Amino acid sequence: MSKKTQSTLLAITAAAALSFSAAAGAATGAYIQGDIGLGHLKVDDNTKLRVSNVGSKIKDSYKESGFMPRLSAGYELGNGLRVAVDFTHYKDMKESYTSAAGVNQTAGVKANSLGLSAIYDIDLGGDFTPYVGGRLGVNKLKYSAGYAAAGERFSSSQSKTKTGVGLLLGVNYKLSEEMALDAGYRYNHMDKDINAHEFSVGLRYYF
């Protein structure tokens, strides 16, 4: 993702946050939302997933897909704009290799994300409402690697907290005045070498 795109998304999200702070009293509705889906993470890396003297059989680039729950809370601000805070948990990414000589190498990434999104609902005058949005995330990442052979073991880990940006696309279907079904796609740039593609469905409840 280019720096220009990242700057644009950051500006959108920051503007939404400021709008919420200034106009919370004018909110047309608060809601909570639960989502389940599939998260597809990809790591491109040459250093973090290694320990000293570990061989080259662990791939520098690998992917992992798995179950991804998300919990959100948000506010409708009117005129199609809403903001939401979410927490997303991703499946742990794991990679391993064992040679014919019994040398075992492992690598992994654990990831969670706390995000603030600015979302615009496109009113088409029916029960289906598509939306687009931008997301600013604070991502907790833990990289680990290990090596075991002939009774010797080495391991290392590194935890990082990184900010990232993302894109949201989806559609809502109105079930009732209080409930809506949500189906969507998200792209989250979590760190310079880790990205997530997310497909989810969820239920939203308005207070």
Image (cartoon, grey):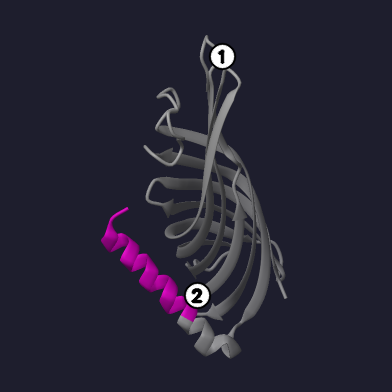
- Which disc, if any, is residue 102? 1
The image position of residue 66, as x and y in percent, is 60, 38
Mark 2, Cα crowd under 10 Å, few <14 / some 14-19 / many 20+, is: some
Q: Is residue 2 magenta?
A: yes
Q: Earlier in the sequence, mark 1 or mark 2?
A: 2
Q: Amino acid at mark 2?
A: Leu
Q: Residue at x 69, y 61 (%)?
A: 175
- Which disc, if any, is residue 136? none
Q: Residue at x 53, y 44 (%)?
A: 157
Q: Amino acid at mark 1?
A: Gly
How would you classify the magenta stretch by its main secondary structure? helix
- Which disc, if any, is residue 81? 2
In front here: 7 or 146? 146
In front here: 154 or 63? 154
Q: Residue at x 43, y 58 (%)?
A: 167
| Image quarter hosting the C terminus | bottom right
Indicate the quadrant where residue 93 lies: top right
Q: CA distance from mark 1 to mark 2?
A: 57 Å
179 horizontally vs 136: left or right:
right
The image position of residue 144, as x and y in percent, is 53, 40
| Residue range (magenta) | 1-17
6 horizontally vs 107: left or right:
left
3 horizontally vs 68: left or right:
left
Q: Is residue 186 magenta?
A: no
The image position of residue 91, as x and y in percent, is 61, 42
Q: Residue at x 40, y 24 (%)?
A: 56
